[in-house]
């Protein structure tokens, strides 16, 4: 049986950052993830997608963010159970928990932090009768490697952040990018909407709205899409292309976690955000996109904040009655579990003293 201080369900960005925050408190972490590698969606779905709202990084690729988080937490020697799904949880008489995976691996910890992101997920597919015939033959529901689209004619469908961000990114990769959305208004960040409009004015992106893709043409692979436009009079036309990428988001499922007795609201776990992001079961926390509370924002940045406060509460559970004094890492430095120590710069310490 694997024993640890904090058992983290989910090895996405929020789970990985928890390792660092827990390490500062001398708490050991072990992570379980159904995917074969850490990083969650950032590694599995869009490792080459740029992220723009991480502090100190004007732009960072999702895969690079994963690498940086792994590097940051490495000194605290986290454990990993990868390629296995957390299946059941049992509360022991002493208040601790045993979590068993679908492969029978048992984990024991006094604190469980669910950081499962959107849970298990499937892409939302458009209702096009022959779309399955072209999957992996020019049709993709997510972008893992943008170089696949180098010098290709790409059609993207969707109106959210992913559709906007990838249209912007591929404008410098593909020979032609066309963004199609069934409304004139987009749901993504205003800055991204403005950038797409700017690229359209520069002739780097074709924008067709309001319209939708209703068919795919081709023999062995995608040769074009059937576009139905509905400005004033509905009309259909074939737009030649090499790739069609419908980005309509993901359909999330909590999986076995939904049967753990937690309070669920709209496929998310309710937590007490006024205190520490604890669930209705003492000792079980939910952080990141998997949780919900009034005013919740599904941002990586918010997951980092929730992980920080959760670790403070976990410390009190693991060390009842022991007072923890918050120390700034700029002053105290960082002691790693591997015996290394990163000292705070002397100039900073002197200035604060």
Image (cartoon, helix red, strand yellow):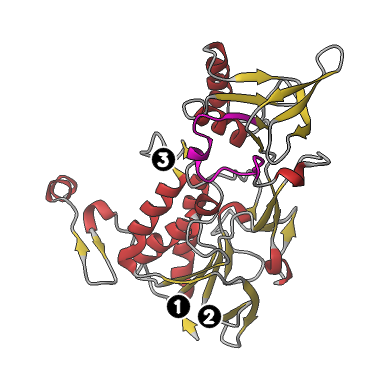
Which residue is rendered at x = 33% and y = 67% of the image?
A: 76
Residue 312 is a magenta residue: no
Mark closest to the chain's N terminus, 3 or 1? 1
Between 106 and 296, the residue placed more toward the observer is: 106
Q: Which label number is shown at residue 60?
A: 3
Q: CA distance from mark 1 to mark 2?
A: 8 Å
Tag 1 residue: 4
Between 269 and 310, the residue placed more toward the observer is: 269
Horizontal arrangement in the rendering, residue 235 relative to residue 308 (left or right): right
Q: Which label number is shown at residue 107?
A: 2
Which residue is rendered at x = 65% and y = 28% of the image?
A: 241
Q: Nearer the viewer, mark 3 or mark 1?
A: 3
Q: Nearer the viewer, mark 2 or mark 3?
A: 3
Q: Residue 283 occupies which quadrant of the picture?
A: bottom right
Mark closest to the chain's N terminus, 1 or 2? 1
Residue 149 is a magenta residue: yes
Between 219 and 117, the residue placed more toward the observer is: 219
SS for tag 2?
A: strand
Q: CA distance from mark 2 to mark 3?
A: 34 Å
Check whether the beta carbons of the residues at disc 3 and disc 1 lie within 8 A of each other.
no
Which residue is rendered at x = 59% and y = 23% of the image?
A: 193
SS for tag 1?
A: loop
Q: Residues within 10 Å of mark 2 (few under 14, many from 20)?
A: many
Q: Position of residue 73 (x, y in %)?
A: 36, 61
Which residue is rendered at x = 70% and y = 69% of the image?
A: 256
Mark closest to the chain's N terminus, 2 or 3? 3
Horizontal arrangement in the rendering, residue 118 relative to residue 300 (left or right): right
The residues colored magenta run: 137-155
> Is 17 situated above or below 124?
below
Q: Position of residue 174 (x, y in %)?
A: 52, 28
Q: Position of residue 164 (x, y in %)?
A: 59, 30
> Is 28 situated above or below 48?
below
């Amino acid at each position: 049986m694997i024993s640890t201080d904090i058992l983290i369900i989910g090895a996405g960005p929020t789970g990985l950052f928890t390792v660092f925050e827990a390490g500062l408190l001398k708490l050991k972490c072990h992570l379980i993830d159904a995917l074969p590698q850490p990083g969650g969606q950032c590694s599995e779905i869009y490792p080459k997608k740029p992220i723009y709202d991480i502090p100190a990084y004007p732009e960072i690729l999702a895969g690079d963010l994963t690498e940086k988080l792994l590097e940051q937490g490495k000194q605290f020697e986290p454990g990993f159970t990868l390629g296995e799904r957390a299946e059941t949880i049992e509360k022991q008489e002493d208040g601790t928990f045993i979590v068993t995976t679908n492969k029978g691996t048992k984990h024991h910890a006094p604190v469980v932090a669910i950081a499962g992101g959107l849970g298990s997920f499937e892409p939302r597919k458009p209702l096009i009768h022959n779309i399955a015939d072209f999957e992996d033959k020019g049709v993709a529901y997510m972008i893992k490697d943008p170089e696949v689209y180098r010098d290709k004619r790409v059609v993207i469908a969707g109106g959210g952040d992913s559709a906007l961000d990838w249209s912007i990114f591929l404008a410098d990769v593909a020979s032609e990018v066309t963004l199609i959305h069934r409304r004139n208004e987009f749901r993504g960040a205003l800055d991204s909407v403005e950038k797409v409009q700017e690229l359209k004015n520069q002739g780097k992106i074709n924008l067709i709205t309001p319209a939708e893709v209703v068919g795919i043409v081709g023999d062995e692979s995608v040769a074009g899409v059937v576009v139905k436009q509905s400005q004033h009079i509905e009309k259909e036309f074939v737009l030649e292309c090499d790739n069609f990428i419908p980005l309509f988001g993901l359909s999330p499922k909590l999986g076995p976690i939904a049967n753990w007795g937690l309070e669920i609201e709209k496929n998310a776990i309710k937590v007490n955000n006024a205190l520490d992001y604890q669930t209705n079961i003492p000792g079980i926390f939910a952080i990141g996109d998997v949780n919900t509370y009034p005013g919740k924002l599904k941002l990586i940045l918010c997951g980092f904040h929730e992980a920080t406060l959760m670790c403070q509460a976990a410390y009190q559970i693991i060390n009842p009655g022991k007072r923890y004094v918050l120390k700034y890492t700029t002053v105290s430095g960082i002691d790693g579990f591997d015996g290394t120590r990163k000292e705070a710069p002397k100039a900073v310490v002197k200035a604060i003293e």
